[in-house]
Image (spheres, helix red, strand yellow):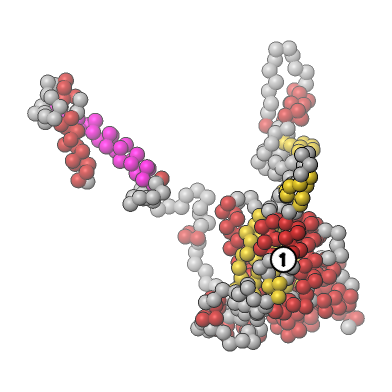
């Protein structure tokens, strides 16, 4: 206010209008009419000056006035489209279900841990290396002979496409056909639009303009592929020591399918008391090879922490590009024994590794993330052979059969209740809670394409179809 007042008196002294009344600059006029005119001109001048200054300060990134903000006057009413925001929703008390309540307490950590256990980061310098450094170094660069006769190192040439088949509504790839618009028109197919208008009007006279109506518009349908953002969540705890062959095989197949494409791959490893993103998503496999040299087997299994770390990475990637297509692939033996760090403290017995696992999986599902869990436990082949179905469907069928027998109403509740299921159905539990699909490593490695198999079923519903339920009824009648 003091600045505005000082500027007002300065304006009265230096106003150019003073010259018209015979006053020199720097003198205060004594004519009352001149005072009124100068005041009327000063009000809009100072208003727009202050407003301009505020906008400039809001854009500044540094300095004492950086980030200054203003509040626009209003009636404190929700704007159009925000009527269902959190602030306007009626309060509704949350009731704890059996799945997230007492049933989860059945799986407790076999170790007594406290908050101090989580202070240190996982030790990635200890343990048996997952890959030989020499093998990774030999893969890092490809040598090529140039026209001058010498040799040079270069990366594999890009295929300039991704692994995910693009939606027809997206403008990706080349146009293959046209159709009537479905929703918002993204790309107008001009030849078919003109032909539709001519067909509607009939013969167009010479000099007459062709009028195109909204019903004549046709849009292009493109055929292409969209790059994926693949996050490999790897279990490098001590229990994985007997499954190194499967882990190496899966990573090598994913490398073969993504190297040279626009798919971005990142690696998150978990052991001891936490998880670390050892490589952010990138298309440069030389960086990924260097990150793989840090993978060493040792420690415990904080599986829920690995899922939460992948969720953090996805949120960061979506800040860079909101159209990113994430795929989380969890490779583990799915025997969690460490809860999340925030679960330790007062009421520790209520927060167990399996409860945190269900919670983390559901958070991934809310973020609309493609999820695949790959179990490296070879003993699980018995379920595939006994049920004569793929791994995910075999475990689902076994769980539904037991659910009907025990009288439960929820598959996850059944897994948490039955001891043998709770101990061995970890891969299926995460896939079910996260809306994904579970695979067995030894079976998946036999497929022609690992990513192709995962993507073909990534959007399928994790529920048994009607004819499968009829088969279950037949099983119940027989046994």
Tally the numbered discs: 1
Residue 24 position (above or below residue 333): above
Front-lying residue, 321 or 407: 321
**Is disc 1 placed on a helix, strand or loop?**
helix
Q: Main secondary structure of the magenta part?
A: helix
Where does residue 159 sit, x and y in percent of width and height?
A: 76, 46
Quarter-wise, where is residue 228 in the image? bottom right
Residue plotted at (13% across, 24% down): 24
Residue 334 position (above or below residue 151): below
Residue that protrudes farthest toward the top in the picture: 206
Residue plotted at (33% across, 52% down): 64
Asked whether, in this view, residue 182 is left or right of residue 318, the answer is right
Give the residue pinned by disc 1.
Answer: 133
Residue 441 position (above or below residue 61): below
Residue that protrudes farthest toward the front in the picture: 149
Front-lying residue, 324 or 61: 61
Q: Residues within 10 Å of mark 1 (few under 14, many from 20)?
A: some
Residue plotted at (60% across, 50% down): 321
Give the magenta-colored segment's residue range.
32-58
Quarter-wise, where is residue 214 in the image? top right
Front-lying residue, 150 or 146: 150
Where does residue 266 sit, x and y in percent of width and height?
A: 66, 60
User: Magenta stretch: residue 40 in it?
Assistant: yes
Where does residue 74 sit, x and y in percent of width and height?
A: 38, 49
User: Magenta stretch: residue 16 in it?
Assistant: no
Where does residue 440 sit, x and y in percent of width and height?
A: 80, 70
Residue that protrudes farthest toward the left in the picture: 30
Tell me, yes or no, if residue 394 can be seen here: yes
Residue plotted at (72% across, 29% down): 190
């Amino acid at each position: 206010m003091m600045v505005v007042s000082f500027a007002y008196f300065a304006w009265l002294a230096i106003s150019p209008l003073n010259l018209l009344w015979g006053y020199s600059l720097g003198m205060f006029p004594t004519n009352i009419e001149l005072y009124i005119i100068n005041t009327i001109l000063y009000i809009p001048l100072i208003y727009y000056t202050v407003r301009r200054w505020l906008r400039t300060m809001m854009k500044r990134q540094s300095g004492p006035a950086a980030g200054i903000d203003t509040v626009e006057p209003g009636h404190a009413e929700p704007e159009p489209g925000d009527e269902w925001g959190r602030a306007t929703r009626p309060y509704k008390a949350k009731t704890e279900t059996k799945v997230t309540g007492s049933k989860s307490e059945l799986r407790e950590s076999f170790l007594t841990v406290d908050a101090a256990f989580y202070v240190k980061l996982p030790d990635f310098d200890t343990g048996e290396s997952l890959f030989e450094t020499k093998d990774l170094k030999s893969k890092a660069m490809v040598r090529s002979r140039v026209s001058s006769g010498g040799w040079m190192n270069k990366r594999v040439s890009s295929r300039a496409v991704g692994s995910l088949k693009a939606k027809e509504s997206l403008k990706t790839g080349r146009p293959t056909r046209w159709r009537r618009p479905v929703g918002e028109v993204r790309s107008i197919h001009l030849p078919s639009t003109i032909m539709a208008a001519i067909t509607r009007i009939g013969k167009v006279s010479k000099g007459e303009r062709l009028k195109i109506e909204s019903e004549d518009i046709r849009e292009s349908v493109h055929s292409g592929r969209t790059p994926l953002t693949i996050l490999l969540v790897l279990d490098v705890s001590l229990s994985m020591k007997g499954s190194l062959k499967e882990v190496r095989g899966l990573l090598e197949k994913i490398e073969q399918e993504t190297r040279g494409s626009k798919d971005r791959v990142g690696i998150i490893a978990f052991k001891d008391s936490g998880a670390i993103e050892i490589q952010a998503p990138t298309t440069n496999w030389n960086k990924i090879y260097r990150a793989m040299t840090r993978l060493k087997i040792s420690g415990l299994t904080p599986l829920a922490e690995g899922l939460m770390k992948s969720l953090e990475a996805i949120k960061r990637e979506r800040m860079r590009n909101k159209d990113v297509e994430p795929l989380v692939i969890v490779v583990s033996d799915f025997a969690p024994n460490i809860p999340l760090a925030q679960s330790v403290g007062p009421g520790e017995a209520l927060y167990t590794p399996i409860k945190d696992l269900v919670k983390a999986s559901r958070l991934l599902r809310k973020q609309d993330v493609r999820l695949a869990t790959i179990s490296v436990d070879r003993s699980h082949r018995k379920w595939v052979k006994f049920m004569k179905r793929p791994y995910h469907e075999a475990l689902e069928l076994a769980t539904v059969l037991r659910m009907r027998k025990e009288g439960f109403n929820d598959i996850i509740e059944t897994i948490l209740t039955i001891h043998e299921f709770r101990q061995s159905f970890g891969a299926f539990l995460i896939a079910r809670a996260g809306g994904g699909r579970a695979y067995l490593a030894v079976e998946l490695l036999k497929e022609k394409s690992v990513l192709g198999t995962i993507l073909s079923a990534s959007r399928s519903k994790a529920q048994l179809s009607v004819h499968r339920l009829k088969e279950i009824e037949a099983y119940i009648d027989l046994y």
